[in-house]
Image (cartoon, grey):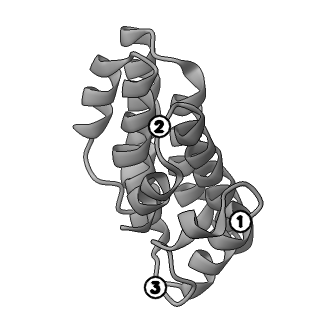
Amino acid sequence: MSTGLAVRLLEDLERYLPAEALAPLSPSTPLSAAALADRAVRQLAPSVLERLGAAEAAQRVRALPALTGGDSARATMPALERIARATRAPPDPIRAAAQCAGALLRLEAPGGEEPGSMQLVAAVTRLVNAAVRAGVLPADAVRAVAG
């Protein structure tokens, strides 16, 4: 777990969201990459999908196994693609969710901690912004990934 990941995410999100929306995420919160990716994929992405009228896709994404590391991420990425094709879900939230999963793979690669963390923060930020554009309250979007 790393408080550095929470700090990095806060720094990225503060460029887009009002300060009061960031309250659910503390810079001192220990945040594991797997937990952050899992919350983004199985909680926030389905919220976005539902608001965009893709309830079936949202339900299927919520039902995916938890992201716990590289092996689960490796299985999640094609599963998200299959869900998108089967349900004709909007591609952007699915793509951002897949990028969150992909970041876990990158994190586990030799020398991948820095680029994997950057990829994860960028993908989570894209999902948070998509959620806000879809009508999720900013603080609720942050709360979904903060845990």
Please report the residue visible at 71 percent of the width from the left and 65 percent of the height from the top.
14
Q: Which residue position is annotated with label 1?
A: 14
Q: Are marks 3 and 1 in contact (CB under 8 Å)?
A: no
Looking at marks 2 and 1 on the same chain, the residue that comes earlier in the sequence is marked by: 1
Q: Are marks 2 and 3 in contact (CB under 8 Å)?
A: no
Residue in the foreground of this view, choosing between 21 and 79: 21
Tell me where residue 52 appears, x and y as whole percent: 46, 20
Whether residue 70 is visible here, answered yes or no, is: no
Dividing the picture into quarters, in which one does residue 82 lie?
Answer: top left
Q: Is residue 13 above or below residue 46?
A: below
Amino acid type, callout 1 = Glu
Q: Which residue position is annotated with label 3?
A: 30
Amino acid type, callout 3 = Pro
Q: Which residue position is annotated with label 2?
A: 77
Tell me where residue 20 appears, x and y as whole percent: 57, 68
Q: Which mark is residue 35?
A: none
Tell me where residue 27 appears, x and y as whole percent: 57, 85
Q: Is residue 60 above or below residue 90?
A: below
Q: Is residue 122 left or right of residue 42?
A: right
Question: In terms of secondary structure, where does tag 3 sit?
Answer: loop
